[in-house]
Amino acid sequence: MAGPIVREAPKGKTVIRNIGLMLSGALENPVLDADTLVAIDGRISDFGKTADVDQEGADLTIDAHGVTLCPGLIDSHVHPVFGDWTPRQGQLNWIDSSMHGGVTTMISAGEVHLPGRPKDPKGVVALGITAQRAFSAFPPGGVKVHAGAPILETGMVEEDFKELAEAGVRLLGEIGLGGVKAGTEARQMVDWARKYGIQSTIHTGGPSIPGSGLIDKDVVLEAGADIIGHINGGHTSLPLDQIRCLCEDCRAGIEIVHNGNATAALFALRTATELGQLERVILGTDGPAGSGVQPLGILRMIAILSSLGEVAAETVFCFATGNTARVRDLDCGLIEQGRAADFVFLDRAQHTAGKDLLESVRMGDIPGVGMVVIDGKVASGRSRNTPPAERLPEIVQAD
């Protein structure tokens, strides 16, 4: 459902060998029995045991040196503006910094922090199209930012959604951050958006910025959006009994964010576990926000939810990869043939008590990022933000 990323198609063959652990991103089979992966022209073409995979004619060869290969992490909830700058904190290069935290794809929940953000219908539509176009053409740090997520305002009509969709916009900004806050009014616009293939997310909890307001369970259920945005609050959460009702009474995506209530996050995770619906759980940071930018926010959420939520680390990695890809209809996030060749190389941090990467995460430690690959090309080497990884992948051949 996210907006199309349109840029020059990558070329060449990339081979990654000596992978110690391959995480699939898929809940049904989170760990693959494979140690080699091949990508051609930015897409996964094959993976498996080294003897069974054609490695000839590589333009780029990476020796993983036994570290973990994971699909690139997806941040399901960000608030970009233009380029790699956020006026919310007056900060540059926050998207590139998140890439150094393993994030290769971001989903806008609305370009709400733009100074002077237009609130008339024509301005809302114009900003949505402009943001979609700008981030499609300019990926900061190589990160695929699916932007152009208009904030709903009173007075918008069906034709506005048709125009947005025809221009390539595939997302609505967080419902409740603009003038539309009533469930009935929101439902009409959600239905229009869905008619034209636009996915919707609704704010959940107390107000986060001036102009926003309380969105409780009744409004969320009445609006019928596709994603329950920051179910654990951004920042202030709903009472836990309302969170349970949201999990039980609809099938929308359950989005848990870094910039929310940790107790509510763990409660939502446990409720989804009890319901047998972990496939609904997706992760975001909800940054930039008043609390700043969190380049390691997704990795921190993985470590927190695994250690305190008592969920296997390989399962929680799926929340930030394959779950989000499936809920958001993205072409990345899973180790499958034909998917985008977006990866993060991980290893346990130096001096962690965990004997391997998964155990260290299960104990609450953030792993070290040794390399990030986007569309089969190296976007960064050793992360400048994570703790140093014990082992690092190495480029052994590059044209």
Image (cartoon, rainbow, N blue to C red):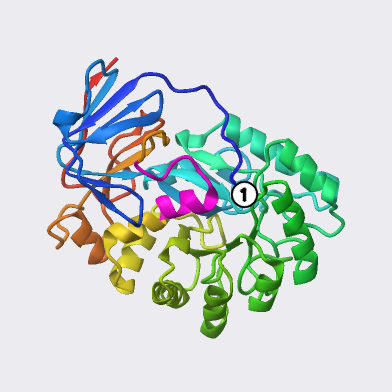
What is the tally of numbered marks visible in this picture? 1
Quarter occupied by the C terminus: top left
Which SS class for mark 1? loop
Residue 365, picture quadrant: bottom left
Q: Residue at x 78, y 43 (%)?
A: 162
Query: Closest to the observer: 309 or 52?
Result: 52
Q: Is residue 398 above or below residue 290?
A: above
Q: Residue at x 28, y 39 (%)?
A: 382
Q: Is residue 204 above or below residue 294?
A: below
Q: Is residue 321 above or below residue 46?
A: below
Query: Closest to the observer: 12 or 140?
Result: 12
Question: Where residue 203 sits in the image (x, y, percent)?
Answer: 63, 65
- Can you see residue 192? yes
Q: Residue at x 43, y 46 (%)?
A: 98
Residue 290 appears left or right of 395: right
What segment is highlighted magenta in the picture? 320-335
Q: Residue at x 34, y 39 (%)?
A: 343
Residue 389 appears left or right of 92: left
Q: Amino acid at mark 1?
A: Pro
Disc 1 marks which residue?
Answer: 87
Does 229 appear in magenta?
A: no
Question: Where residue 239 sits in the image (x, y, percent)?
Answer: 55, 83
- Can you see residue 182? no
Query: Closest to the observer: 296 or 14?
Result: 14
Question: Where residue 238 sits in the image (x, y, percent)?
Answer: 57, 79
Residue 314, picture quadrant: bottom left
